């Protein structure tokens, strides 16, 4: 039996979109997994990802240090996946992505555990986006508490439960036209959640460089327009694409931030799209990428048809010419 069966890994934020991929990969590698989440009673979907008793959800909120310390106790490795795309009530960018990251890193430091922290490409202390500024602040806080931490900065992450490809596919089902914020010219490097999870599990294994910051992107750099066009092709929807200048988009977002579901758009999300979200040349040169870890990333075109078919008019029974 694998020696990893005796190794406890605590994952904060493990019940979310990326989290379930990380939990599945760690379970496959025989780790014992404690999942620190705000609502453990809603984490039943994680149990089938491992053996009986292998995955143990516990209550933890990064805004409450005592709960974080309790969840980290006894762990050899601590993984922080906690992040939010929009602020709500007490769940602010600063509380979750800055102070919350610091709380998790301090808990790891207190017990001498290794730390793996997930941030985002675009993390920048000088960004006009509060999301990006707090991601950068979180990275700094993590390295201050645990200098040997490994940090991963993924580009926009896609997969079956994402809020990216599913969002555009959902909008295309409801609206005859889709807005292209900033003309759809922003460059992104979509990365598959399964590949990010593999990188995180490799870091838990000790295969990543301590104290290093990796940038994770897929095999292709694409504009937002190209991504939306691909989604429309896969879902077999013919929709008008309407360029929307950043200024007008931000004005609309002031109202749409209160909209439900796929129509929700915040001013901060508009700000994020002003900057390209791709792996830097410096990261490539240093080998701090998926490829540097020996991982061959999957493309958007290869993965998305496996789950976006449900947005076609006749679902899985639609004829696919792709």
Image (spheres, rainbow, N blue to C red):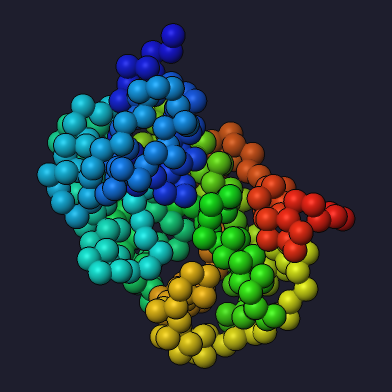
Residue 258 against residue 81 in the figure, above or below:
below
**Residue 93: x %, y % from top left:** 30, 65
**Residue 297: x %, y % from top left:** 63, 43
The picture quadrant where one finds residue 51 is top left
Which quadrant of the figure contains the N terminus? Answer: top left
Which quadrant of the figure contains the C terminus? Answer: bottom right
**Residue 21: x %, y % from top left:** 49, 40
In the image: residue 237, left or right of residue 74:
right
Outermost residue toward the top in this view = 1
Residue 294 against residue 302 in the figure, above or below:
above
In the image: residue 215, left or right of residue 108:
right
Outermost residue toward the left in this view = 66
| Residue nearest the viewer, comparing 13 with 58 | 58
**Residue 99: x %, y % from top left:** 21, 57
- Residue at x 22%, y 50% (from the top left corner): 61
Residue 140: tell me if it is visible: no
| Residue nearest the viewer, comparing 201 with 19 | 19
- Residue at x 43%, y 44% (from the top left corner): 19
In the image: residue 248, left or right of residue 235:
left
- Residue at x 68%, y 81% (from the top left corner): 177
- Residue at x 75%, y 51% (from the top left corner): 316
Residue 163: tell me if it is visible: yes
Residue 214 against residue 255 in the figure, above or below:
above
Residue 16 against residue 134 in the figure, above or below:
above
| Residue nearest the viewer, comparing 218 with 140 | 218
Q: How many marks?
A: 0
């Amino acid at each position: 039996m694998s020696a990893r069966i005796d190794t406890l890994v605590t994952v904060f934020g493990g019940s979310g979109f990326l989290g379930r991929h990380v939990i599945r990969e760690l379970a496959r590698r025989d780790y014992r997994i404690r999942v620190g989440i705000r609502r453990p009673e809603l984490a039943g979907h994680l149990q089938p990802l491992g053996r009986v008793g292998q995955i143990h959800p516990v209550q933890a909120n990064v805004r409450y240090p005592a709960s974080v310390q309790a969840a980290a106790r006894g762990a050899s490795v601590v993984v922080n996946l906690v992040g939010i795309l929009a602020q709500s009530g007490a769940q602010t960018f600063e509380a979750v992505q800055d102070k919350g990251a610091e709380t998790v890193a301090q808990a790891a430091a207190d017990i001498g555990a290794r730390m793996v922290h997930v941030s985002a490409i675009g993390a920048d202390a000088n960004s006009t986006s509060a999301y990006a500024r707090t991601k950068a602040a979180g990275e700094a806080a993590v390295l201050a508490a645990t200098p040997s931490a490994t940090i991963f900065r993924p580009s926009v992450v896609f997969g079956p439960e994402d809020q990216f490809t599913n969002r555009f596919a959902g909008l295309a089902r409801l609206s005859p036209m889709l807005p292209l914020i900033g003309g759809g010219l922003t460059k992104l490097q979509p990365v598959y959640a399964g590949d990010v999870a593999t990188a995180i599990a490799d870091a838990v294994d000790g295969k990543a460089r301590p104290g290093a910051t990796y940038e994770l992107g897929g095999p292709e750099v694409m504009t937002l327009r190209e991504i939306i066009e691909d989604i429309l092709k896969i879902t077999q929807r013919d929709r008008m694409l309407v360029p929307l200048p950043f200024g007008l988009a931000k004005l609309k977002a002031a109202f749409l931030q209160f909209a439900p579901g796929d129509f929700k758009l915040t001013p901060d999300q508009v700000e994020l799209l002003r900057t390209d979200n791709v792996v830097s040349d410096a990261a490539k040169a240093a080998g701090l990428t998926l490829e540097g870890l020996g991982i061959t990333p999957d493309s958007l075109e290869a993965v998305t048809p496996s789950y976006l078919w449900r947005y076609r008019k006749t679902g899985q029974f639609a004829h696919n010419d792709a």
